[in-house]
Image: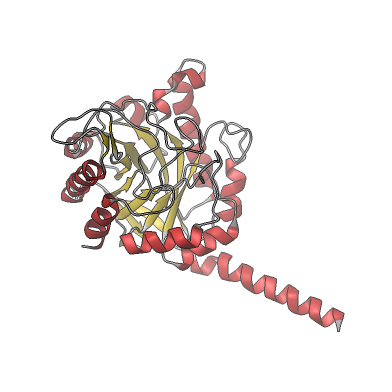
Amino acid sequence: MKIINLIIVFISILFVGSATYNSSEIDVVSTSKRQLLVNNVPYYIKGICYHPVPKGSTKRNFSNIDQDLKLMQEAGINTIRVYEPIDQIEVLNKIEQVGIKVIISFGFNQDGFYDIFSGTFIDYINKYKNHNAILFWELGNEYNYHPEWFDGDINNWYNALNESALLIKENDKNRPVATAHGELPNSEVLNSNPNIDIWGLNVYRWDEPSSIFKEWKSLSDKPVYLSEAGSDSYMTIEKDGYLQGENQKAQADANSKIIDAVFENSEINSGLFVFSFLDGLWKAGNPDKQDVGGWAPNSVGVPYDGAPNEEYWGILDIDRNKKETFNVLKEKFKS
């Protein structure tokens, strides 16, 4: 009887594995001209940046993944962007089961945790490359602002970026490779990275990012998406009719205009990720309370005060109460 039970368990494991990793069912994600395609059907990103760190902690935690996915579905979000790989198959499975995709991002030096510096990022790709929750791979997050991380020469990063993208292509034929660049790269950067299929741009140009698409159109014929865009819900000063202090209306108004501008240029772009899903109490001070302040590169374009109050960026607060901007996403993403 014990042998029979072991055989049943073994068969069950094989069945579950094949359901997740059956190569005949793998989505093929590709690019064509300015479009992102899934199984040859255009895919437009209506996304959210997702790094759920609980109050009092500095580490990401997926204990609320079921609630979060329901809220994302309600808001019409179809894609998640994470800043470090998800090495929990049950989380990836839940994302897939609700019909949402995730972009997996790899950092350069993350102490050997699936990072580019150690080369272990390719281990993750080979482990999960057949998982249909994953839309594509993304290398780095606005590293162009930090040459000090690369011996003072940002070309060291661009060389690593192009080589890493090539290695991904040699191991996964079913997904494009992207990077998240701070603002617009120049032609030299683009030419030095031919292995990047689709470019993500972190763009903070007040509440009107349309100019970035005109500039991109004249620079490249590759697909592009906004890997970060949006506004926080705290006004450091009173400005443009918005009072100083926590101001959810300022955030909602800015995000509404930003999303409209992206959608109006959909013939050039492949969508956007609003930053972010949840307020981050870990970012600017004591993680047990919400602090004002923080700093981010190239952040003077944050509406409407030019100040990135780092702990107020969520479309939800830390207790997952909806801010005014949640309904903005819901209206825009579902229309």
Give x and y (percent) for residue 255: 24, 45
| Residue sitting nearer the eye, 147 or 130 | 147
Residue 226 higher or lower than 35, as above or below: above
Residue 125 falls left or right of residue 307 = right
Question: Is residue 130 visible to the viewer in this orientation of the structure?
Answer: no
| Residue sitting nearer the eye, 62 or 108 | 62
At 52% from the left edge and 36% from the top edge, which residue is drawn? 107
Give x and y (percent) for residue 196: 40, 39
| Residue sitting nearer the eye, 17 or 240 | 240
Give x and y (percent) for residue 276: 37, 45
At 62% from the left edge and 71% from the top edge, which residue is drawn? 16
Residue 11 higher or lower than 144, as above or below: below
Q: Quadrant of residue 249?
A: top left
Q: Quadrant of residue 333?
A: bottom left
Q: Quadrant of the N terminus?
A: bottom right
Instruction: Report the residue that reaches farthest toward the bottom.
Output: 1
